[in-house]
Amino acid sequence: MSRDLRGWIEEVELKAPGELLRVKRSVAPDRFEPTALLEQLEDRGEYPAVLFERITNLKGEPTPFMALMNVFGNPRKIGLAMGLAEPAGRAELFQTYLRRAAQPRKVQVVAPGEAPAKEVVVRGRDLDLAALPFFRHNYMEGGPYFTGIVGARALDSQRYNISWNRMMYLDATHMATYMSPRHLWSHFYEAEEQGQALPGALVLGHHPGFHLASAALTTLNDDEYEVAGGVLGEPLRVTPSEAYGEALLVPADAEVLIEGEIVPHRRTIEGPYGEFTGYTGPERLSWLFEVKALSMRRDAIFIEIFGSHRDNMAAHFPIEAHIYDRVRHAVPTVKDLCWIESGGPHNLIISIKKRIEGEPLRAAMAAIAASNFIKHVIVVDEDIDPGDLREVSWALATRFQAEDDLTVLKGMQGHVLDPSLRHEIRGSGMVLDCTVPLDRPYPRRARVPKDVRERMPLGEYLPDR
């Protein structure tokens, strides 16, 4: 039995009770109704996956579909996506993901008749995207969206790329998409230079391990279908597409596949959109996706990401894992780091066992070099949990002197979504070394003796807590 979204839902309900909630009342995704409920949960500090069992389409009609959100809302569910039965800390999650991603598996090609994603096929005049449940997430967004995974490959290569790409509804057969200047963007421009479109398929629902692999910081030489197989722990099953046959293989166990192509020499308006920064990004001149075929399961479950909120940031978990890997290569005594829960999307907190002076700056520069998401790095000692902002703030208050421990970085590449940039892409950053100096005496942290704490478990003395 291949790993798919339905199996993951069953696993969550079995192994992590309370991590999945079901909403049985009908909701209208294009009227902000699912995200209104998720934001209220977020205000309470709760991030369960939520399965909306009755959803309407853009015409306001009932559909046979369901929608799943907050899949990546907390580390417990991310761990289950990677086969971890028990809760795990950040470092263990990083290491598990990196180990799996480093063991790619060749795809398994299956016939269309064996592909659950082919239960329903729609082509030609029957195509009408308005029959699907597009989402509006946040106020002021330019239109209803899907936040799915685009699978495509360069025209002259057999290597597949998978990446998160939002798609905004335009009409029955067209969507507007935004592409960051990475692999999909490169493949498209190579095709456009030849006057050709770039075929691709928007995947709207698969096992969360597949979605995690789509955020991996791979090279152009890596086949990301194979990386997805590594993360899943088994080969990704693929099948010929409806519109392009064997020229475009698509995930056989997907819930929904929207096949089409990014059109050359044409652009369209896309946005505004709620970005991972927590701000509404601007309207942009973006790319046109023309739909050629739709295939799906009869009772498809759409995975949708809550843009600009915790789910959006946590879906970037593989980027955090790859940053961790790069930093540990530079400074092997790195204990932990925290980006997603660091208090801001461009901040990173690193915990190290410092051996010599200068290591904090080396670790910070490795992180900044790994990703232009990062502009501020705080480095703390191993006794500080980088995910606990109260502890980090204490280290900043008691182990940091600005004239000695602050490094300002001017003229470095920033991130286009950073609303504080004055230039389109050039900005600045800083490193705050909040570690205890090794070249002079320093007070010890005031703590109760460890052996006494261990022989006096709280439950024995305060059993009602």
Image (cartoon, grey):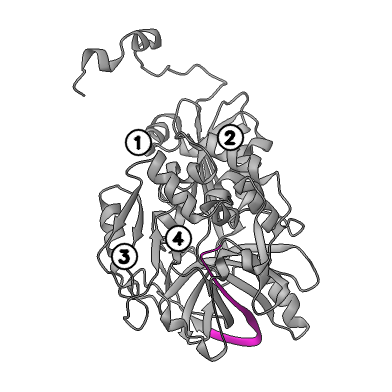
Mark 3 or mark 4: name the one nearer the start of the chain: 3
* Magenta segment boundaries in residue numbering: 254-268
Report crowding for label 4: few under 14, some 14 to 19, many 20 or more residues within 10 A (C-alpha).
many
In magenta segment, residue 332: no
Residue positioned 67% across, 51% down in the render: 235
> Mark 3 and 4 residues: CB-CB less than 8 Å, in contact?
no
* Residue bearing mark 3: 34
Mark 4 or mark 1: name the one nearer the start of the chain: 4
* Residue bearing mark 1: 390
Q: For residue 94, say whether it is visible.
A: yes
> Mark 2 and 3 residues: CB-CB less than 8 Å, in contact?
no
Mark 2 or mark 3: name the one nearer the start of the chain: 3
Q: Position of residue 160 (x, y in %)?
A: 70, 63
* Residue bearing mark 4: 276
Q: Which mark is residue 174?
A: none
In terms of secondary structure, what is the magenta stretch mainly? Answer: strand
Above/below status of 75 relative to 223: above
Residue 457, picture quadrant: top left
Q: Is residue 395 left or right of residue 38?
A: right
> Mark 2 and 4 residues: CB-CB less than 8 Å, in contact?
no
- Mark 1 vs mark 3, CA separation in Å: 32 Å
Give the residue at the far bottom of this rendering.
125
Mark 2 or mark 4: name the one nearer the start of the chain: 4
Above/below status of 29 relative to 459: below
Give the structural element (helix, strand or loop) at label 3.
Answer: helix
Q: Position of residue 308 (x, y in %)?
A: 40, 62
* Residue bearing mark 2: 360
Amino acid at the residue labelled 2: Pro
Amino acid at the residue labelled 4: Phe
Amino acid at the residue labelled 1: Arg
